[in-house]
Amino acid sequence: MRVSKNILIFLIISVSFLLSAFAFAEAGLPFTGEDPSLAIAYDGLPLAQPISFDNIRDVGNAETQVSRTIPVSDFVQSLIDGSAGTIRGLYVDNKFAFPVVQQPTGNAAFVSTTEDVITDFAMPRKYGVTGLLAHNYLAGIEFFELEIGDLIQVVYGDGNIQMYRVSDIQSYQALSPNSASSNFVDLATSEKLTASQLFKRVYMGEHHLTLQTCIQQGSEDSWGRLFVIADPV
């Protein structure tokens, strides 16, 4: 049976759109827990009740040393390499000062496994949002120390600084903890969201900064996801 040229073009466009949407959901929420290679289904888990983050920092790497006293001017000077527009560091006064690395081209799931290093999430830049990732057993454990109102300084390679103020902290249970396309439950409201819906919620909209790491529950490093949202000052 012959297929007309117009129908063939329509089919190609439709398949391309579906593949793009699938890739969006797959790459939208990279792992920030311990082992992203596992694919364990947890769809049968009951919806979680809100949990306290008071002791979560203790489940991280106890040996991680975080600079809390380095002056921001010294920190900025240590990062300057002339690369305007490239994020090189993240600074919160009296809490932490971490260098930032870029994701390899085409690898939206990459999260640095180097101690005390944060990763610049490339995909949100397409939507005018800055996203930064860190494993919860490395630098990401410090994200739990952030509070509403904290000032975050994003340092660029040319020495420029963009200031943000924390405006919201969101936490979610991942129903399939080790799947990038897991569904999620908002721990504050019990609302269920797909990976794509959650990506849109935290990585789209007006320009802002989103910090992402995983929440550990028991022995499950990737049980949930924490997002710290900060608006430009």
Image: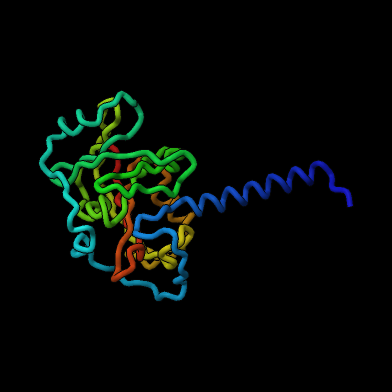
Q: In the displayed structure, does residue 23 sit left or right of residue 130? A: right
Q: Tell me which residue sits at (30%, 29%) in the image.
A: 157
Identified at 24% across, 46% down, the residue is: 116
Q: Residue 34: x and y, percent? A: 34, 59
Q: Position of residue 80 (x, y in %)?
A: 25, 27
- Where is 230 relative to 163, above or below? below
Q: How many marks?
A: 0
Q: Is residue 179 above or below residue 219?
A: above
From the image, which quarter does the C terminus lie in?
A: top left
Residue 134 in view:
yes
Image vertical order of residue 196 relative to residue 117, above or below: below
214 or 206, which lies in front?
Answer: 214
Q: Residue at x 29, y 56 (%)?
A: 136
Q: Is residue 193 visible?
A: no
- Residue 106 % position (x, y): 49, 41
Return the residue nearer the eye: 150 or 219. 219
Relative to 21, is 140 on the left or the right? left
User: Quadrant of residue 73 in the image?
Assistant: top left
Which color scheme is applied? Answer: rainbow
> Residue 96, percent across and down?
18, 45
Query: Which residue appears farthest toward the top when viewing the image?
Result: 82
Quarter occupied by residue 33: bottom left
**Residue lying at the far left of the rendered structure:** 69
Residue 216's image quarter? bottom left
> In the current view of this chain or complex, which residue is farthest to the right?
1
